[in-house]
Image (cartoon, coloured by chain):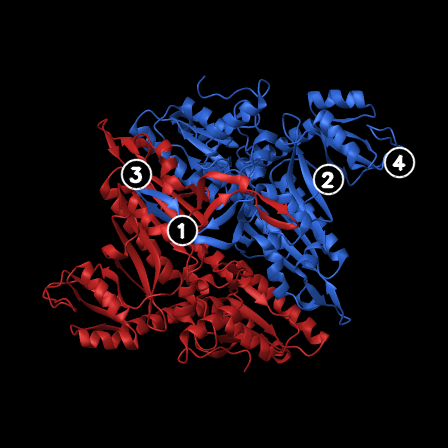
Chain colours: A red, B blue
Amino acid sequence: MSKGVTPQSENFSAWYNDVVKKADLAEHGPVKGTMVIKPYGFALWDNVKFELDSMIKDAGHVNAYFPLFIPKSFLAQEAKHVEGFAKECAVVTHTRLKSVDGNVVVDPESKLEEEVIVRPTSETVIWAMYKKWIQSYRDLPLLINQWANVVRWEMRTRLFLRTTEFLWQEGHTAHATAEEAEAETLTILEIYRRLAEDILAIPVLTGRKTESEKFAGAEHTYSIEAMMRDKRALQSGTSHNLGQNFAKAFNVTFQNKDNKEELVYATSWGVSTRIIGAIIMAHGDDKGLRIPPKVAPHQVVVIPISRNDEQKESITKFLNPILEELKENSVRTKVDWREESPGFKFNDWEMKGAPIRMEVGPRDIENNQVVFVRRDTGEKSTIQAKDIVDKTSQMLSAIHDNLFAEAKDFMKSNTNITDSYEEFKKIVDRGGFIRCGWDGTSETELRIKEETSATIRVIPFDENPKNLKCIYTGKPAKHEVIFAKAY
Amino acid sequence: MSKGVTPQSENFSAWYNDVVKKADLAEHGPVKGTMVIKPYGFALWDNVKFELDSMIKDAGHVNAYFPLFIPKSFLAQEAKHVEGFAKECAVVTHTRLKSVDGNVVVDPESKLEEEVIVRPTSETVIWAMYKKWIQSYRDLPLLINQWANVVRWEMRTRLFLRTTEFLWQEGHTAHATAEEAEAETLTILEIYRRLAEDILAIPVLTGRKTESEKFAGAEHTYSIEAMMRDKRALQSGTSHNLGQNFAKAFNVTFQNKDNKEELVYATSWGVSTRIIGAIIMAHGDDKGLRIPPKVAPHQVVVIPISRNDEQKESITKFLNPILEELKENSVRTKVDWREESPGFKFNDWEMKGAPIRMEVGPRDIENNQVVFVRRDTGEKSTIQAKDIVDKTSQMLSAIHDNLFAEAKDFMKSNTNITDSYEEFKKIVDRGGFIRCGWDGTSETELRIKEETSATIRVIPFDENPKNLKCIYTGKPAKHEVIFAKAY
């Protein structure tokens, strides 16, 4: 079947590549590692963006835009930060091309005095501005978000999961106290959890990252981690408490209520186009995507089944008021009038993961009904025309709940508790999350990673290390943690 | 008055810089020529974006995202195109930094084999993709738009008007026939006219660009041109018919209905953050911005006038249902509770150009009324509480109409018809548009530009060159054109 995809069980990675391509989500761009997000993939991202943007704004943040270019010296200002990004920076060194013997070459005379870095993230350029904007406690908190592209020159790339350029939102806040900054970090983590679970139907683990897994320049990092259908983890959003590190680097102080100068406290946090990868791999099956209804570009795809122009016309007449009513109820619909067979269209929209397929043929019209097919279960039902709006909203909601429940069951049944390193290794081999004790040292973490490729995804908020032993050293556990192989 | 701005009549350019700064729209970024769009400025851009995006989508286009990075060889593919952009390209040559003796330097070993250009516009990368996506007439038309940042390394920059990096939408369409491409180019020009006139209340001239003013790589370019309050022109949107130039450069052919291979026809078109400059300079006055209501971040700013907590509370109680009702009617409101004097707030929101100021004090509450002040005219009126929603919508609409009428009168009274080059020069000196004959040669155009700095803004659609003589050479006019000094 030329239209199919490699089964997940056969080769998950090939399945992923097939689905991204056949569902028309994205392609590689001409420069190595870059990505073209095609219209269907972009509509999906735009819906995710809309939902997340609303949540961020409701929590009191405003959007702004900071420059793509950062002076090299700025990036170097915070030692850990530059260390973290030095190996993957796109560096602009010249500003002109010229023609030499018919070839277009870089004009050596246009060399910049100071090289410019294409932002890998915007802490440094933003904190250079915050220094100008913050004088007193009255200027705080400063709660700013931006939607932007960033660049990290990755060696091994994968569409959506790891690309040289990606799209994201990055929030950057400034606070008067350590407590406020910590509260903000957790507020955002909760927004990310709601995005994943309530909007994308992806259950996530939340918790803190270890020292070796935290953001370069942060005091500590929180993240949401989801389980993909190959039982590997995907970090889907991170929220960093930056303490006073960037305030120190850029000398950003404020006058507190007692008229004393203090360094400002900071957070930063981001969700990127990587989350599209999570949607694909948390819900997809061997027929293709299963897009969670709340962000589906088309929640209901209508397949008219007609043999001639007369039937076409009567279907159009039958559909118009229905489509109008669905639109009024904020349901996103699409009628597929392409000159292809119904079978082709069924497969195509299964591949593209539209939550509901509505089939309408001449006999349906006679009976004043349509046929609904759920993408998640394949279940068919006949719906009376008058019930379409109600049934649609119920079914979309049921699909969301079912996708969430399925993914939650999957994560639960593939999360293991063990205190034996032998078993640990077996579980890592067959895939899944492992909850176990860890002695809290980076050495142990590194050895386990070297021996098994598994890393600590989070120290979960509900950890209970009491009486636990480290899975590797057998020493008393400092933390209960979640290990997994990750993307 | 420390809060004021330089009067327009004294120094228009200083006035502009003052307003951008004091209305909190934008600032310069650390890398020369870059711009930080502050939250208030970004909210304005976001509203413009929302309106334009809706119009573009309603006309059948979809959004996508193409990479920031373009291989140097791609840019060089279309000769005129690379010529047009060669002198202002940000070139990425390296991908790593390293630490040497405590200094962060570019790692010479990370030099790229082929340099990468930061997109100045995306024709080349998009047409390289279109080559893969287009096979037959069934794949046409392809109507894609993207919202993105682009980079042109400008020597002389000005916030919003000319910046090294700016935000824009760029549409790129592919068609089966020259006629369709031309129709698309004009459809978009009409959308841009509607954006300017119906949304932003800025009257514009529409027409075709001359050969020397057209886009690098286009067959011809159309534009909308607005008159700023210093009587100079600002090009505010352009729509290009690219003919088969890019299809040739990237060898993009399609099988037509007769099974013959043909080159595809193309258009591209864009509106950028430059249009924020048009809003500022078409409507602003000596008190600051006057933002057209349809894109104002806050259409109604409420200034509560209270002396104590008790009054504050009663104002809040009085306002809540009113704000709720305004919100239900899609009016964007903001209550300014800052601890500043009412006078300070009046000035501040005049500077920021909020269309309506609503004042509410204890006596107003007693009388169940509020005071409205129009930003455009300064007119005050007392409004009964029950009438607020109706009056708001009427007043916003009246403000739009008045801003448009004012700007239209201004453009009309500063547009001159002449056939004397002596008078032409005088008009250019005092400012304004000139409608006159032109012999159609680039030589004449260039000489006039050198002697007066005026350029041909457009060949208007309603030109009537019959019986006209060229303003410069006295030869029979080939076109009737609009000259002006431009931004």
Q: Nearer the viewer, mark 4 or mark 1?
A: 1
Kindly identify the amino acid type of the residue bearing the numbered disc 4: Lys
x then y, percent, for residue B80: 68, 48
In the image, is B456 to the left or to the right of B118? Answer: right
The quarter in which the C terminus of chain A is drawn is bottom left
Q: Are marks 2 and 4 on the same chain?
A: yes
Residue placed furthest toward the front: A101
Q: Are marks 3 and 4 on the same chain?
A: no
Q: Chain of mark 4?
A: B
Tag 2, which secondary structure? Answer: helix
Query: Which one is nearer the viewer's eye here, B406 or B97?
Result: B97
Task: State which quadrant residue B432 falls in.
Answer: top right
Q: CA distance from mark 1 to mark 2?
A: 41 Å
Residue named by callout 4: B466
The image's mark for residue A249 is 3
Q: Is residue A58 in view from this perspective?
A: no
Question: Vertically, is B383 above or below B324?
Answer: above
Tag 4, which secondary structure? Answer: loop
Residue at x-position 21% and y-position 28%: A258
Q: Are marks 3 and 4 in contact (CB under 8 Å)?
A: no
